Image (cartoon, rainbow, N blue to C red):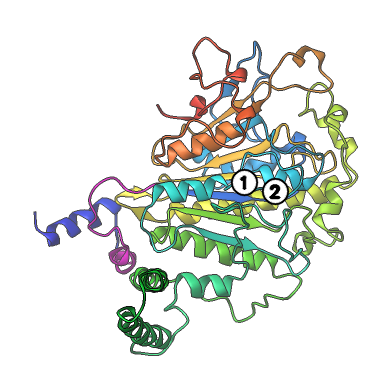
C-alpha cells in the first residue's frame, strides 16, 4: 500500500469530515502505523473536598477486601461527569491513604502526593512519578513533560513545598508555567508570529548557533585534552538545547495552535482564574493532540489556596483555604459512616465549599471533553490518556490524608477498567469494627500509573508503603499487599 492509500485509510478510520480534514491532516499521527501512544496527566486541585458529597456510591468493604460498584452512581460533587457523558470514562478510588504525608498540614500532603516519600512538610528530595515515567519512557518528544499551572493573583508565588507538586530527577522543584500566554508561545512558538516568512526568533537563533558552533569547533584543535573535553561537553549541551527548540518549533508548526487569549483577558485581574483555567486546558489538550509530550501536569492554585471564587456567586467572599477550615476538624466527627449527610452540620460554609468542589470537577470534565474531541492513530485521545486527579488533603480542616480523593479519567490505552468505584478498607476513627483494617497506600496508585504508561515498575516511593510485593488476589488480602492496583487494570 502506498503512502497516499495509507493516508486515505487513516482519514476514514478517524472519521474525518470536510470540517475536520485540515486539522486532522496536520496531526503528527497522520498516516502513522503501530499502536497509538498513551498519555498521562497528573492534575491537582487544593484543600480536599466535602466528604459526604464526594465520590460515588459503593458498599462498605468487609473482610479486608475492597468493594467494587459499577456502573457509577456519583454523589453531588462528581455528577458533572454524568451530565457531560463521561461516566464510562471515570474510575473513582475511595479509601487510599497518602501515608507519605507524615504531618497534619497541607505541606506534607503536597510534598508526598506524587513522590510517595515522607517529607514532614519539607520539600521532597526524590523525583515525582511524572518525571520518573517521562525519563524512563524516553519518548523522544519535543518536551519531556509539560507542566502548567492555573494561578490567581491572590496565590502564593514563592518556590516552596506548598506551591510545587512535581520534583525532577535531582529532587528539585519543577516550576510549572503559570501564564497561558507564555505557555502558548513556549509550546507553539510560531503562534505568536502573525507575519509571513520564517519566524524571526528561529532565524536569529539558527544564525547564532551556526556561528557559535563553528567557532567552538575551530578552538578545539588549540586546546589540551582536558579543556577540549570540557569545550565539547559545552558544545553538546548547546547543540541539545538548539535541537529541542527546533523540534518544538517543527512539531508545533505541523499542528494547529490553540487560539489566542480573548482581547478582554487580563491575566492580572482578580477574576481571571476561570479564564486562565480554560486557556491552560485548551493548550494542554492541543499539546497532547500534537504529541508534543506524553506526560503532563496541571496544577490549580496551591496548597492553602488563596483563590476567592467570586465568579461562583456573591456569597464567595473568602479564600478557598479559609472556607476549607470551617469544617470537620477530624474524621471522627463524620461518625461511623463518613458519607452520612448528617455531616453537613459540621461545615460552617457548606454552600460555598460545595460550589467550589463542583467547579473544580467541572474543570476536570472540561479537559476530558477536550481530549475526547481528538483522535490519535485511529483511537480517541481520551481513551489513550489517563488523567489522575488528586488533592493534598482529604478534609481541609482536619488535614487528614486517609480517605484521600483520587479520580481517574480516561482509558489509559485500554489498560484501565472504568465506570466503577473501588472502595478500599480503611480505619474509620469512629468505627471500632475497622480497627484491624490496614490502609492501602497511594504509592500503589503511582505504581499503577507507571504500568499503564508501559513501565515495568512494582514499587515507588518509600519502601515502608510496600510491605510486600505479592500480586493482589494471592493468599494475602488486598489491604496488606502492595504493587499495582489490579482492580483497576485490564490485565
- The mark found on residue 169 in the picture is none
Q: Nearer the viewer, residue 184 or 161?
A: 161
Please provide the residue range marked out in magenta.
18-38
Q: Nearer the viewer, residue 473 or 343?
A: 473
Q: Is residue 27 magenta?
A: yes
Which of the 4 quarters of the picture holds residue 250? bottom left
Q: Is residue 394 visible?
A: yes
- The mark found on residue 358 in the picture is 2
Q: Position of residue 447 (x, y in %)?
A: 52, 35
Among numbered discs 2 and 1, the one appearing first in the sequence: 1
Is 440 placed left or right of 271 in the picture? left
Q: Is the magenta region chiefly helix, strand or loop?
A: loop
Q: Is residue 44 magenta?
A: no
Is 162 placed left or right of 468 in the picture? right
Callout 2: few (<14), some (14-19), or many (20+) C-alpha neighbours within 10 Å? some
Q: Position of residue 482 (x, y in %)?
A: 56, 24
Q: Is residue 392 visible?
A: no
Give the residue number, with chain letter if any, for mark 1.
80
Amino acid at each position: 500500500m502506498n503512502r497516499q492509500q495509507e493516508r486515505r485509510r487513516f482519514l476514514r478510520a478517524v472519521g474525518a469530515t470536510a470540517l475536520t480534514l485540515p486539522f486532522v491532516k496536520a496531526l503528527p499521527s497522520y498516516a502513522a502505523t503501530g499502536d497509538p501512544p498513551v498519555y498521562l496527566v497528573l492534575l491537582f486541585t487544593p484543600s480536599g473536598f466535602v466528604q459526604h458529597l464526594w465520590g460515588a456510591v459503593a458498599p462498605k468493604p468487609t473482610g479486608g477486601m475492597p468493594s467494587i460498584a459499577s456502573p457509577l452512581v456519583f454523589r453531588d460533587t462528581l455528577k458533572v461527569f454524568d451530565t457531560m457523558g463521561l461516566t464510562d470514562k471515570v474510575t473513582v478510588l475511595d479509601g487510599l491513604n497518602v501515608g507519605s504525608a507524615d504531618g497534619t498540614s497541607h505541606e506534607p500532603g503536597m510534598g508526598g502526593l506524587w513522590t510517595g516519600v515522607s517529607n514532614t512538610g519539607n520539600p521532597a528530595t526524590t523525583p515525582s512519578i511524572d518525571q520518573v515515567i517521562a525519563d524512563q519512557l524516553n519518548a523522544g518528544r519535543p518536551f519531556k513533560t509539560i507542566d502548567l499551572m492555573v494561578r490567581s493573583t491572590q496565590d502564593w508565588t514563592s518556590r516552596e513545598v506548598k506551591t510545587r507538586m512535581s520534583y525532577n530527577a535531582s529532587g528539585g522543584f519543577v516550576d510549572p508555567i503559570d501564564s497561558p500566554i507564555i505557555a502558548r508561545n513556549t509550546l507553539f512558538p510560531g503562534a505568536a508570529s502573525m507575519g509571513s516568512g520564517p519566524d524571526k526568533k528561529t532565524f536569529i537563533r539558527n544564525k547564532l548557533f551556526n556561528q557559535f558552533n563553528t567557532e567552538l569547533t575551530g578552538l578545539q584543535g588549540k586546546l589540551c585534552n582536558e579543556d577540549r573535553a570540557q569545550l565539547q561537553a559545552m558544545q553538546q549541551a548547546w547543540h541539545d538545547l538548539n535541537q529541542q527548540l527546533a523540534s518544538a518549533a517543527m512539531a508545533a508548526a505541523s499542528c494547529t495552535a490553540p487560539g489566542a487569549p480573548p482581547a478582554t483577558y487580563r491575566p492580572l485581574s482578580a477574576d481571571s482564574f476561570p479564564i486562565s483555567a480554560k486557556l491552560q486546558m485548551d493548550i494542554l489538550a492541543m499539546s497532547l493532540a500534537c504529541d508534543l509530550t506524553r506526560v503532563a501536569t496541571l496544577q490549580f492554585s496551591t496548597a492553602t489556596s488563596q483563590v476567592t471564587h467570586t465568579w461562583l456567586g456573591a456569597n464567595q467572599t473568602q479564600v478557598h483555604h479559609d472556607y476549607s477550615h470551617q469544617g470537620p476538624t477530624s474524621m471522627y466527627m463524620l461518625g461511623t459512616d463518613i458519607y452520612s449527610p448528617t455531616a453537613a452540620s459540621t461545615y460552617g460554609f457548606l454552600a460555598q465549599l460545595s460550589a467550589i468542589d463542583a467547579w473544580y470537577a467541572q474543570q476536570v470534565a472540561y479537559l476530558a471533553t477536550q481530549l475526547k474531541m481528538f483522535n490519535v492513530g485511529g483511537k480517541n485521545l481520551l481513551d489513550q490518556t489517563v488523567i489522575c486527579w488528586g488533592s493534598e488533603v482529604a478534609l481541609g480542616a482536619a488535614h487528614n490524608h486517609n480517605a484521600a480523593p483520587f479520580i481517574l479519567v480516561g482509558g489509559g490505552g485500554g489498560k484501565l477498567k472504568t465506570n466503577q468505584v473501588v472502595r478500599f478498607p480503611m480505619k474509620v476513627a469512629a468505627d471500632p469494627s475497622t480497627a484491624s483494617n490496614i490502609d492501602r497506600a497511594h504509592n500503589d496508585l503511582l505504581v499503577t500509573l507507571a504500568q499503564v504508561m508501559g513501565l515495568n515498575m512494582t514499587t515507588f516511593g518509600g519502601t515502608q508503603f510496600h510491605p510486600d510485593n505479592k500480586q493482589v488476589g494471592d493468599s494475602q488480602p488486598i489491604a496488606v499487599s502492595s504493587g499495582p492496583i489490579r482492580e483497576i487494570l485490564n490485565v
